[in-house]
Image: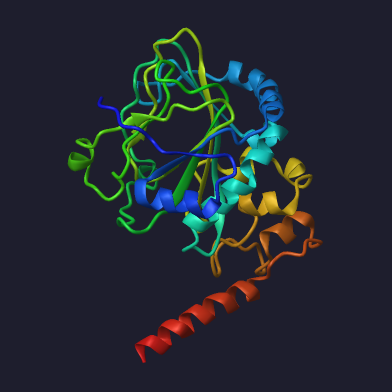
Amino acid sequence: MPGVGLHHFAPDADPEDVSDHLRRSGYAIVDDVADQGLLDRLEAEAMPYIEASTAGRDTYDGRFTRRTGALVARCPASRPLVMHPLVVGAVGSFLGHASAVQLHLTQIISVEPGETAQKLHRDEMAFDFFDFGPEYHAQCNTMWALTDFTAGNGATWVLPGTSGLDDEAARRVAGAQAEMGRGSVLFYEGKVLHGAGANTSDGVRRGVNITYAVGWVRQEENQYLACPPEIARTLDDDLLRMMGYTQGAFALGYVGDQTDPLAALRGGSAKAKTIGQVAERNLDARRFVSDIDD
């Protein structure tokens, strides 16, 4: 596969610049973002679960690749990554066309020696292959390097600018591997062609895949079951809202008699947005459209 250089941002990158690059190229890499001590704690917390995870069932999942999920519940050190200000800012801007953004997936991907290159794909296919159209983005992914990502150990291949191309044209685009140091983060959206590389080294390539989606789609990883209520109630409200304890849009996701899901989890004690507040926002938007039509 031909290689081209990929753009890297400094750790103090402006989230808006990262978001703009995502829109133009389908990816962005920000170097040296995560605290190394935090990554050490995350790896220690996750290792028993990683060792218990089975390898993939086929070449797409990776017969030498382990995928370990439910990180919010299992690994407290994953929570600052989920809510990292750079990520929340960049993803919030990139998916700002939606009423809400939610956590879509948490997963540590361990690509072990001997793994072959993954088939290039677009992650939006998970939504039953629904065609969102080239301009509408339903998700934004991050891959945090828990180990160094190198060409030899299977760093992710990215084909920049392929989001608006059909598969035949996209596969003719030159790609490159997202080589980056431990603690760096790769952003990539759901339409860009990408895939894990082959691991020809003698070490494991390990990344933390944390993905976000617009609030009105179903989550790839069911956060309400992956993180039991007794653990969820110990988490702060901002993280819970990101996990989906909020309304995804007007009249989407309330509980019972139109109770906000965060308030339902808290037993009515949360100062959460009411369905009326969401309705008012949506009605304002609809009035604006009506005024244009008139």
Residue drawn at (39%, 41%), measured in percent from left and top? 123
> In terms of image quadrants, where is residue 197?
top left
The correct choice, above or below, for 223 with respect to 44 in the image is: below
Q: Where does residue 270 sit, x and y in percent of width and height?
A: 78, 61
150 with respect to 49 (left or right)? left
Q: Residue furthest right?
A: 269
Q: Position of residue 44 (x, y in %)?
A: 69, 21
State whether residue 230 is above or below residue 240.
Answer: above
> Front-most of 62 and 253?
62
Toward the viewer: 168 or 9? 9
Q: Position of residue 73 (x, y in %)?
A: 69, 36
Q: Is residue 227 visible?
A: no
Rendered position, 219 above or below 106? below
* Residue 156 x %, y %: 41, 28
**Left or right of 9, for residue 77:** right
* Rendered-image quadrant of the N terminus: top left
Counting labels gives 0
Q: Residue at x 70, y 58 (%)?
A: 262
Considering every residue shown, the one lying at the far top of the view is 202
Residue shown at 44%/26% (left/top)? 179
